[in-house]
Image (cartoon, grey):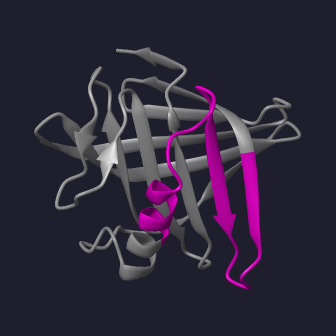
Amino acid sequence: MKTLRRCVLPITCLALAAAWLAAGPQASARGVTLIQESNGTVKTYSDVYMALAGQMLTLHSPDKKGTLRILTGACSFDKSVEHCLPYSVTLTQAGKTHKIAISHGSVFLNITNEARHLPLSSDILAPRTVLVLFTTAHGTYVTVKGTLDEVKS
């Protein structure tokens, strides 16, 4: 696994996050995942099932053919918003699991029942919402946002 840099939110991720947050609340409890390849191609996955169990965030595609697992660590709290680093990311598709090398990123969790401000931002995370931003070692930007469908301690 590639070591995470100290700068967890580069300017490009901040711009993507601001645009994503400005889009407003989601229509359903499921999340959306955006993947921007290094060549500029953007793929959008809607109705992503999102579950949090301890420090593991699991995302399932609507057709249940793909699963992305994000293991977090080095977490801190700013009021009630948890900010963590993504330590390990794996993608399972067609029965095969692939480890994804991460360059840098952040995971923000608001598991309270009230909207909360993101740290050092005027943007707000809705109740039970997760925002994930990370860049792979190959230059792919991944953004995930949505309301958690399931939370286990």
Q: Is residue 1 visible?
A: no
**Quarter where residue 77 is shown:** top left
Q: Residue at x 62, y 73 (%)?
A: 140
Is 113 on the left or on the right of 21, as rendered?
Answer: left
Q: Nearer the viewer, residue 22 or 57?
A: 22
Residue reaching furthest left? 79
Q: Nearer the viewer, residue 133 or 67?
A: 133
Picture layout, residue 148 above or below residue 24: above
Picture layout, residue 108 above or below residue 120: above
Q: Residue at x 38, y 71 (%)?
A: 14
Q: Nearer the viewer, residue 67 or 121?
A: 121
Is 61 on the left or on the right of 59, as rendered?
Answer: right
Image: magenta residue range? 16-45
Q: Residue at x 64, y 50 (%)?
A: 33
Q: Is residue 4 visible?
A: yes
Picture layout, residue 19 above or below residue 47: below
Is 43 on the left or on the right of 95, as rendered?
Answer: left
